[in-house]
Image (cartoon, helix red, strand yellow):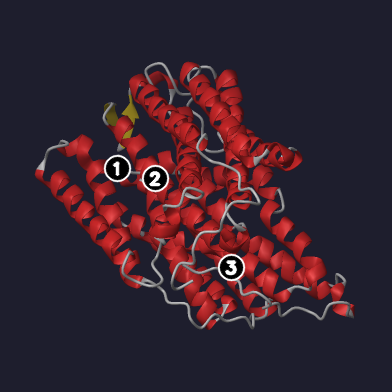
Amino acid sequence: MTTNHVAGGHTGARAGGPDERWSARWVGRLIVLVLVSEVIPVSMSLAGTALPAISGEYRTTQASWTLTAAFLAAAVAMPLIGKIADIVGKKKVLLIVLGCTTIGSVVSALAPSFLLFAVGRAMQGAAFALVFLCYSLIRDLFPPRLVTFAVSVTVTGTGLIVIGQPFLAGWLIDGYGVGGVFWFLAVLTTVLLALSAAVVPESGVRVSESRPDFAGAALLGFGVAAILLGVSIAPELGFLSLPVVALVLAGLALVVCWVFQARRVAQPLIDLRLLGSRSLLPIVAGGGLVYGAGASITLVLPILAMTPREIGAGYGFGLTATGYALFGMASGAGLVVGGLLVGLTARQGARRHLIIASGVLILGTIASALFKADYAMLMVATTIAALGLGVGSAAIPNLVIESVPPERQVISSSIVEVSRTLIASIVTPVVFVVMNSNIARVAGGQPIYTTGAFDGAYLAVGLTIAAGGAVSLLIRRRTTGDPSPSPVPGH
């Protein structure tokens, strides 16, 4: 897996020169890269809010694949995209990823079936790579004195998403339906592709020894997809039905083949030897479980809130997508505040932050289950859960810094990001399997869940978060006396 950086590879302005100061050129490049890095949060937020509409549009109980397809595709695509960028250039790959995201958005907007819609969503999963491509371009291109601020702004974004995205989602979904959401994303990425081509220069940094592991990506991607598909359709066909058993067994076989393949190649998709180290494995497992389960809460919520009370059997507020915007703002505010709290209390340690995040998330999950029929209390519960998710998300990259030796931090960060996305792709359909096992009836092609469906979903989420918090207790901070892991061939 690629590091996306080369020591001494900075190609920005000469230190101390006139280009060390902010100018219209540097500001313009930064604005474009910040906007590009916000494509994925906009895409995921819009798609999450549209879940009830997607269920009705395609008359499916499998709407969770709207997010699962993107998460899974991102997990296997990010390492490949990073290595290809090292070889051919980061700007070229950035433009290709934006183009792929645009095509995927068009496919989803025009899809006559949910299967084709999910294919489009998988293509949009490539957008997850935009964030680290933007970071890498900033590091390679910007003058050293401007890099820290530029990266910080790219991480925090403009803040407009928290305020504007929920209302944008409401306007698009209520006014233009599911297609409107994805036509908007297609136009957005097309404009950003043109701006990036015109404003952002190519990086001169190359890593010629990078080798993309296409075979590993295929084995892992199709293996996990087969398992999740089998699990997803089990509530409808039966957990012991032939299609379910066949898909799960085939998926497991592919995953086992991937494990053997990953141990034989010099540059595997995910370095299992490094992943299995005592310093990294608890971070991947603990952080992934907390993040994946926490993100599932934000997917269950719009279904709960948009169901009309008269058909929801004790839950639901009958909100339109526009009416749901207040919940979206509460969730966004919680995420932002959580991230800020981590920054302000950095000396407390990221391990403590992740443990606290799991506790806050569990509190928010319990409150969501208890007050799912109370609008005001559910709003409070949503904010609490989002606060915990914000703390946990911000803690994960800091855990790598605290626990992994410096020479392994870049590659370890890549493994953590891929693994976190992969775990999220697994947790999401599992939660919806619980819900789909408790469907009261179908109205207008959209499943109407029993109250027990939400109780079961929140229970599954809470147990997963608790497991992540327990694993987090095993994380230990690196000390100056800790030996570095032995070098892994191919890195």
Name the residue located 73 percent from the left edge and 43 percent from the top edge.
343
Name the residue located 35 percent from the left edge and 65 percent from the top edge.
217
In the rendered structure, which amino acid carries the disc numbered 1? Thr
In the rendered structure, which amino acid carries the disc numbered 2? Ile
CB under 8 Å between callouts 2 and 1?
yes
- Residue located beneath label 1 in the image: 60
Q: Which residue is outermost to the left?
A: 242
The crowding category of the residue bearing disc 3, from other C-alpha atoms within 10 Å (few below 14, some 14 to 19, many at least 20), is many
SS at mark 2?
Answer: helix
The crowding category of the residue bearing disc 1, from other C-alpha atoms within 10 Å (few below 14, some 14 to 19, many at least 20), is some
Closer to the N terminus: mark 1 or mark 3?
Answer: 1
Q: Which residue is outermost to the front?
A: 481
Across and down, in percent, residue 8 comes to 69, 77
Across and down, in percent, residue 416 comes to 50, 53
Closer to the N terminus: mark 3 or mark 2?
Answer: 2
SS at mark 3?
Answer: helix
Closer to the N terminus: mark 2 or mark 1?
Answer: 2
Quadrant in the rendering for residue 113 = bottom left
Name the residue located 33 percent from the left edge and 27 percent from the top edge.
449
In space, the residues marked 3 and 2 are separated at their CA atoms by: 31 Å
- Residue located beneath label 3 in the image: 133
Front position among marks 3 and 2: 3
Q: Name the one closer to the observer, 486 or 226.
A: 486
In the rendered structure, which amino acid carries the disc numbered 3? Leu
Across and down, in percent, residue 129 comes to 52, 63
CB under 8 Å between callouts 3 and 2?
no
Q: Name the one closer to the observer, 72 or 288.
A: 288
Name the residue located 47 percent from the left edge and 48 percent from the top edge.
278
Front position among marks 1 and 3: 3
